[in-house]
Image (cartoon, rainbow, N blue to C red):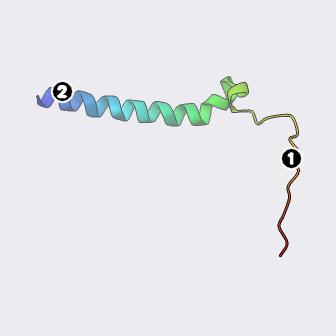
């Protein structure tokens, strides 16, 4: 049982490290996934003035 818990903790730490690495290194290798929208969006707004 102890071996299973240690393996799960190790996998959780490994997954966390992978997520952090993807957040920092991902934009270098996958720039399209992290790019902001390139087209301008305009929408009229009506404000109530009482």
Which residue: 88% across, 50% down? 44
Please name the residue shown 60% across and 36% down the image.
24
Quadrant that contains the N terminus? top left
Front of the two marks 1 and 2 = 1
Is residue 19 toward the left or the right of residue 12 in the image? right
Q: Looking at the image, which residue sits at the far top?
A: 29
Q: CA distance from mark 1 to mark 2?
A: 54 Å
* Element on which disc 1 rests: loop
Residue 14: image quadrant is top left
Label 1 close to label 2 by CB (< 8 Å): no
Residue at point 21%, 31% (across, down): 6
| Quadrant in the picture for residue 49 | bottom right
Image quarter where the C terminus lies is: bottom right
First in sequence: mark 1 vs mark 2: 2
The residue identified by callout 2 is 4
Residue nearer the viewer, 24 or 47 = 47
Q: Residues within 10 Å of mark 1 (few under 14, many from 20)?
A: few
Residue furthest to the front in view is 50
Element at label 2: helix
Q: Residue furthest left?
A: 1
Q: Give me the residue at 72% from left, 27% from top.
A: 31
Residue marked by disc 1: 43
Return the x and y of residue 17 as percentages of the image width and height. 45, 34
Which of the 4 image quadrants contains residue 48? bottom right
Of residues 26 and 48, the one drawn nearer to the viewer in this rendering: 48
Q: Position of residue 20 (x, y in %)?
A: 51, 37
- Horizontal and vertical percent position of residue 33: 68, 27
Q: Is residue 49 above or below residue 19?
A: below
Residue 27: image tag: none
């Amino acid at each position: 049982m102890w071996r299973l818990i240690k393996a799960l903790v190790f996998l959780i730490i490994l997954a966390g490290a992978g997520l952090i690495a993807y957040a920092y290194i991902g934009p270098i290798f996958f720039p399209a996934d992290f790019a902001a929208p390139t087209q301008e969006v305009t929408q009229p707004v009506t404000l109530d003035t009482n």
